[in-house]
Image (cartoon, coloured by chain):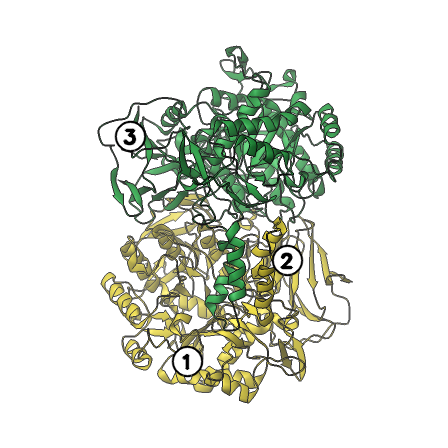
Chain colours: A yellow, B green
Amino acid sequence: MIRRYVYGQPWPSFSCVQEICPEAEPMPYFHVQQAEKGLTFTTKLEKDEAIYGLGENVRGINKRGFVYRSYAVDDAPETESKSALYASHNFLVIKGGKRCFGVFFDDPSLFEFDLGFTDPEEATMTSRYGKLNVYLIENRSVIAVAKEFRQLTGRSYIPPKWAFGYIQSRFGDCSEEEINRTLDEYRKLGLPIDSFCLDIDCLDEYQNFTWNPVTFPNPEQFVREKQEEGIHLIPIVDAAIRKDDANEDYRRGKEKDVFCKGPGGEEFAAYVWPGLCAFPDYFQEKTRKWLGDRLQRYLRMGISGFWSDMNEPSVFAGQGGFRRAAELASATDENYSFLGFGRMMGIGQLLYDEKSDGKNFCHRIDDELAENPEVHNLYGGMMAFGMDEGFRMYNPDERFLLFSRSSCIGSHRVSGVWLGDNHSWWSHLLMNLKMMPSMNLCGYLFAGADIGGFNGDTTDELMLRWLELGIFFPLMRNHSCWGTRKQELYRFRYSEKMAKIVQIRYSLIPYLYSEFMKAALRDECMYRPLAFDYPDDPRAAGIEDQLLLGQECMIAPVYEQNAKGRMVYLPEDMLMIRMSSPDSMEEICLARGDHYIALETEQLAFFIRKNRAIPFAAPADKVKNIEESSIRMIGWLQEEYGYEYYNDDGISRQISQDNLKIIPCKP
Amino acid sequence: MIRRYVYGQPWPSFSCVQEICPEAEPMPYFHVQQAEKGLTFTTKLEKDEAIYGLGENVRGINKRGFVYRSYAVDDAPETESKSALYASHNFLVIKGGKRCFGVFFDDPSLFEFDLGFTDPEEATMTSRYGKLNVYLIENRSVIAVAKEFRQLTGRSYIPPKWAFGYIQSRFGDCSEEEINRTLDEYRKLGLPIDSFCLDIDCLDEYQNFTWNPVTFPNPEQFVREKQEEGIHLIPIVDAAIRKDDANEDYRRGKEKDVFCKGPGGEEFAAYVWPGLCAFPDYFQEKTRKWLGDRLQRYLRMGISGFWSDMNEPSVFAGQGGFRRAAELASATDENYSFLGFGRMMGIGQLLYDEKSDGKNFCHRIDDELAENPEVHNLYGGMMAFGMDEGFRMYNPDERFLLFSRSSCIGSHRVSGVWLGDNHSWWSHLLMNLKMMPSMNLCGYLFAGADIGGFNGDTTDELMLRWLELGIFFPLMRNHSCWGTRKQELYRFRYSEKMAKIVQIRYSLIPYLYSEFMKAALRDECMYRPLAFDYPDDPRAAGIEDQLLLGQECMIAPVYEQNAKGRMVYLPEDMLMIRMSSPDSMEEICLARGDHYIALETEQLAFFIRKNRAIPFAAPADKVKNIEESSIRMIGWLQEEYGYEYYNDDGISRQISQDNLKIIPCKP
């Protein structure tokens, strides 16, 4: 059952699709009071209670024991010191022996979660402005609560099927030539690929909706050629627009009055990648229309996928910021002290000040002006709505690919996400795994991390192990940052091993797509910690390095340098599938309990739950070339069992029950 | 067998105590050649070969698969991106089925280890200047190689026994009053303690050899009072000295010509904590004498322990650095671009430039002038030698406590270390464990990390779990940084649980001290990965979250948030000891293999190897109050077995065989 409680006068919300009448009674479980920092919601925690949710954040699947913050920021690296990442997802589930409920704090501004940090036996949530809707969902299990929450907030975004293919990406060195070279090398390796992401170096001076004239001299022709080869190009769209009358998109926006302004009508401007920028006010319909219009030239070229970035929004510096920094630096004289040093080192902090530099950063919502901090966390989501409206304007019947860095609850209906600008760290491989069920709980099914790590230098072994995890997630992108070791797979000593792992991905796509679609259509979580499915198994509650995938599988990647295997806990009898290529499959029945699984660097394992089986196709070089006729079932094969297989044309928005069929699992 | 190979004309070395005649033949195993980056040493790696060593560094116990660098830096945080930390320890052991050898690159300057990073099957070491001694040690096992290496480089530093007690520390908020309050609170909790570290906030404007007049108004009296209570105060000594004629220590140094100078005789000066500083040239005997002289006033007050910091050496800014930064900041005008932003953010990088700001940073070695980069990695170690000479000047017969941030091979004979400025991260708790055997291999037995984490905010659970590991390491210090959550143990909700864990420490000290002393006297490693002791067990090779402690024990801490237990691999039958206080002991015999060990937050477990037992004393409030008569044996008790127990007065440098006795282990 879902109950709604209203505090203060909330801004209109875009998060829910169900209208729930507010309760008059006080909310159970929580003690609510106005405190200095804001409106607080406090609940005592039982010793056995776990806390799940919060979408994109650091630390464990069970979030208990630390303090988290919803205020979208662009602030790598994602270390254990961080409390806030690129998105804000204010939904959590508290689950213990006595209580099981979800609570969604529908608050677009700064919101803090002290989940047993100050006091290990208490959780306190604080809303800075105290203007919010709170939805309380009580049900018998985490899974049931999650389903109700999805029904409240709407069906998860569904991308085109080709988006399940391998995506190559690189910030800094991309060009027509590089893409062709990579395709050549991948062809030689037999490494399947469907798409390339184009980062801001592919733009003209980092400006949205342009092409870099040096590296992409013939974009129309190049896009068409790649399309003929079956390769999708996925351009980037950043949040801000260069404030420059020579820029047509900016001029149009100014004509249509789409940019954020202050109370006196002055346009807000701040520095980001392209220089001094205006920030489209995506809260307004006309702005979203302006954005959608901008996409039409891409769509007409045949492009059908985008990624959107810098939409927390990220601001490098305000107009006053440089002046302040310069003044500070000049004022430092020979009378040096440690404090002077500290100030100099902290110059980065001076470059943008929300109060002074951001005083004109306002949004117009229903004819009211909201300062950005009041609705900050929705910005990326509102931009996603604008992208989606642009897609529908072009073709209302087909799906388009969209994944975003910032996000909020609500925009999960129109967009996927990648899990932020991670590092080439083993700990981030594991963090990638831990984030997935939290993202699913908050509605984001189409998600994945930058495989191999975005920042920092990856290694052959880390890349290979990360691929062995990444092939199991819907968004499978290898992306890395300018200045780091290049990580196109052909560049590695282990490139042949890597190619075989990507081949396994393509063999698994029939299953992954089927489970993804069923989870989306049925409002379920595709990735779950063991605790969700085995609530009565106390061991399952502590397992944070394995995940259930769909209804049939469990994954358990290796995430340690030089490891030649790992311990895996089986909450029931399972069939282990160990492989290093689609045709090297080894199957071993394992009993419930702990097992050491030997895994050479090029080997991965996954586990099929008792009496289940999954479809597995012959390898293909592209998603569209996966032959349905090549599918065979692997797992516990027996007469009486069938796998509920979903497939469709991969592109229509229209979803039909006819797309479901039962595949028998005869031995 | 140890063989020595000489390349170029090395600087005089302080690392070895044995004189080995150089070989004329080329060194086996390695292909040596002059390359652009320096002199390279390359060896092919067999698939099964592990690489151990490198002392203080990030990543695994097995270092294979990444690139590491010896060039001591003050550069927190210790993430997986880092290749160099505060120290440099150029000893590694390559161990596989076919080869087992150690190699020590005795090079005081920039040295790089590419251990399967560029090519997973190759290791390449690069000496920037190509002036070095290389020692090759071939033997049957890692343990045997390690012993030979210690014999080459000399007996490990032995502190006074009181240094095994619990040490409280805090940077930023320390005062006579705070220390008294903490002692009061600890007394109420029954929390044993022996010492307090005093950080630079206890100094007068961060100047060495002073007292903060506000927070330590009566230092002589305070030191005496604490001494009467059995509490040791451990002042800090930083590397550099404020360049100020009002500073007597500086004046004396100038008179005696002890500071680093350039080729033209100009004194080197750069900014550190106390402002513009001179850097003592600890390579010169007269400088070490000057340092030793400075210590005498502390020693006469009754102080008998120090920690030394900032001795990489850390330099915040050069004299030209501020000017460059100020100019850059002022030059940035409204024609802003991303590159301008990047430059502004990178201002910190401009503040010290080794070439221009460091041009006078030279050391005098045997009447030759060495630029700091050529012998950079020895600076911290040479300072430690100076401290040690000062101790011996005061009292040649007694041991003094010294632990340092920077270190090198050689100074392990006169100093311990703490493992750098870590963070309050679960991953650093585990890193702490992984560093210990690498430190031991390189000669550092007296070591430990800042428990609870230095930077960042700790939590009740992290602090408690970290104590559960920290009690097993020789240096047991709780230390944290200004601006982070205060972490004196009485401040936590779990303070009573924490007090009981510290009590266990004191019960274990007879064992820990005995094993420490035997390891020091016999040139052995006190902490070892399972791979060292069970070389024929392939599972043991992969275990990097458990350690063997001494000859009897294995430790396996919990290092995950919210975990209520962990998997432990037993390479042989062992007796598990699970406890949450000295009198809550539970003993369970476990067979070789994998076991899930349930451990509530307040419970730790350790494991006693088959047919062994360890001494365990009744709790005491201070090391000196541990009653030998209260010792009982715990473990596999049987008539035919005895534990070889070492104990002494804890203070004399004179070590006697009479300090060893066999304690019977009768049931």
Residue B299 in the image: state x and y as whole percent: 64, 24
Residue identified by numbered label 1: A652
Q: Which of the two residues, B613 or A658, is positioned nearer the viewer here?
A: B613
**Secondary-structure class at tag 3:** strand
Secondary structure at badge 1 equals: loop
Horizontally, is A1 left or right of A449 in the view?
right
Residue B160 shows in this picture: yes
Judging by the rendered image, the residue that carries numbered circle 2 is: A94
Inter-mark Cα distance, 2 to 1: 38 Å
Asked whether the beta carbons under mark 3 and mark 1 sit within 8 Å of each other, the answer is no
Q: Quadrant of the C terminus of chain B?
A: top right
**Chain label for disc 1:** A
Tell me the amino acid under the disc marked 3: Tyr
Q: Nearer the viewer, residue A468 or A306?
A: A306
Q: Can residue A446 be seen from the camera position used here?
A: no
Residue at 66% in and 21% down: B624
Residue closest to the eye, A518 or B553:
B553
Q: Is the residue marked by circle 2 packed among few (<14), some (14-19), or many (20+) residues within 10 Å?
A: many
The image position of residue B526, as x and y in percent, is 48, 27
Position of residue A404 measured from the top left corner of the image (x, y, whole percent): 49, 70
The numbered mark, 2 or 1, whose residue comes first in the sequence reads 2
Classify the position of the N terminus of chain B by image quarter.
top left
Separation of marks 3 and 1 at Cα, in angstroms? 71 Å
Residue position marked by numbered label 3 in the rendering: B5
Which quadrant of the structure image shows residue A513? bottom left
Q: Give the spatial CA distance, label 2 vs label 3.
A: 64 Å
Spot the residue most to the front. Answer: B264
Residue type at mark 1: give it.
Answer: Ser
Does residue A317 appear to the left or right of B300 in the view shown?
left
At a point 42% along the width and 65% down the height, the residue shown is: A474
Q: Subunit of mark 3?
A: B
- Whether residue A166 is situated above or below residue B122 in the rendered picture: below
